[in-house]
Image (cartoon, rainbow, N blue to C red):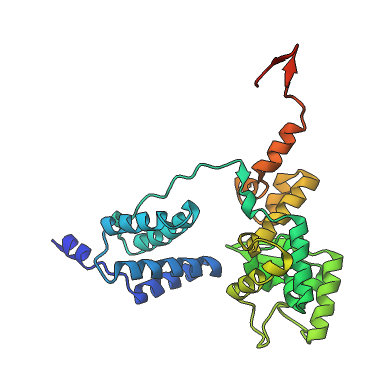
């Protein structure tokens, strides 16, 4: 009887979300993860409209998300609410993730080329946005995550390396000599003598949403599709460029801070169009033999 009564009053509230996110923080989850989970939980709360939560309503929300978003996005939302349910012992409300087949190719429509990256940097410079141009170059030349930019400090640049703490793991991110010179000159002009280099006028670390918005605004001037313009794509470009030069995926995994090399493989995928060109260059297709057409 008591168990039935507990199920009856399963209401998602802002206070319950706050407590869950506070617990995630105590578990040393990254700020980015906590913000993402908070966003999805608030979306779920708005969907339920203070109705009692059971697996039925969660499945309805899952169906709603699937009709509007990519499977990866849906699974991100499900991860947030399943974790919330586990925290409050509502495990019977949990639902399964969408099974996603791993494609050996990346989406060509979202693949940022080196030329497009260079045009984005030039567009930022032409706009007089030196901070954005350096931020884009810092991410792309080091493979650092946008959430890790706070570790790019004056002290780190002076040493030529940043000690990054992400998800409880500390790794060293090397910064090229040329980048260090550029960043130190920028910091000197801005009067930044210590701490994080990429800050607002008030001295606060840049917000990822502001960075995202500033980058998107460069699209038209740079001649780059907006779907390709997002900070994490710069990290992907770094990974593909490094792998093309070194062919060392284990070393690349260490540089990117991946505990699983399979995650790194996602970063090194090429577009299907590029793979098709590689196949055509093999010269293994026989178009005619003794005047008889052959289909392979």
**Residue at the (79%, 69%) spot, across then down:** 122
| Count of numbered circles in the view | 0
Residue 140 pos. (x, y %): 73, 61
Say if 202 sits above or below 219 in the image: below
Which residue ends up furthest to the left in the rendered image?
A: 1
Residue 133 pos. (x, y %): 76, 72
Residue 78 pos. (x, y %): 41, 57
Residue 105 pos. (x, y %): 62, 43
**Residue at the (64%, 45%) spot, across then down:** 265
Q: Quadrant of the N terminus?
A: bottom left
Picture quarter containing residue 153?
Answer: bottom right
Residue 267 shows in this picture: yes
Say if 62 sits above or below 219 in the image: above
Asked if residue 102 lies left or right of residue 250, the reply is left
Asked if residue 13 lies left or right of residue 205, the reply is left
Say if 82 sits above or below 191 in the image: above
Decide which of 41, 231 is in the foreground and name it. Answer: 231
Which residue ends up furthest to the top in the rendered image?
A: 290
Q: Quadrant of the C terminus?
A: top right
Decide which of 64, 163 is in the foreground and name it. Answer: 64
Which residue ends up furthest to the front in the rendered image?
A: 291
Decide which of 182, 121 is in the foreground and name it. Answer: 121
Asked if residue 262 lies left or right of residue 155, the reply is left
Residue 30 shows in this picture: no
Picture quarter containing residue 16?
Answer: bottom left
**Residue at the (77%, 64%) spot, across then down:** 119
């Amino acid at each position: 009887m008591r168990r039935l009564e507990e199920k009856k009053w399963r209401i998602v509230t802002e206070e319950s979300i706050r407590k869950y996110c506070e617990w995630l923080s105590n578990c040393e989850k990254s700020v980015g993860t906590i913000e993402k989970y908070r966003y999805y939980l608030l979306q779920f709360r708005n969907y339920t409209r203070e109705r009692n939560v059971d697996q039925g309503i969660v499945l309805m929300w899952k169906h709603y998300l699937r009709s509007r978003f990519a499977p990866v996005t849906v699974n991100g939302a499900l991860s947030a609410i399943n974790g919330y349910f586990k925290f409050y012992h509502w495990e019977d409300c949990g639902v399964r993730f969408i099974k996603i087949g791993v494609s050996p190719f990346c989406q060509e429509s979202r693949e940022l080329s080196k030329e497009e990256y260079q045009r984005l940097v030039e567009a930022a410079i032409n706009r007089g946005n030196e901070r954005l141009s350096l931020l884009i170059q810092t991410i792309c030349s080091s493979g650092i995550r946008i959430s890790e930019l706070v570790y790019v400090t004056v002290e780190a640049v002076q040493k030529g390396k940043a000690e990054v703490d992400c998800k409880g793991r500390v790794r060293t991110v090397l910064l090229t000599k040329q980048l260090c010179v550029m960043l130190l000159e920028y910091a000197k002009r801005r009067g930044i003598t210590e701490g994080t280099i990429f800050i607002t006028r008030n001295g606060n670390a840049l917000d990822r949403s502001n960075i995202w918005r500033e980058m998107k605004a460069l699209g038209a001037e740079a001649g780059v599709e907006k779907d390709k313009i997002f900070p994490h794509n710069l990290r992907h470009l770094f990974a593909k460029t490094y792998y093309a030069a070194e062919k060392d995926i284990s070393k690349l995994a260490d540089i990117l801070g991946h505990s699983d090399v399979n995650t790194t493989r996602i970063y090194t995928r090429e577009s299907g169009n590029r793979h098709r060109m590689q196949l055509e260059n093999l010269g293994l297709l026989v178009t005619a033999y003794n005047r008889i057409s052959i289909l392979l």
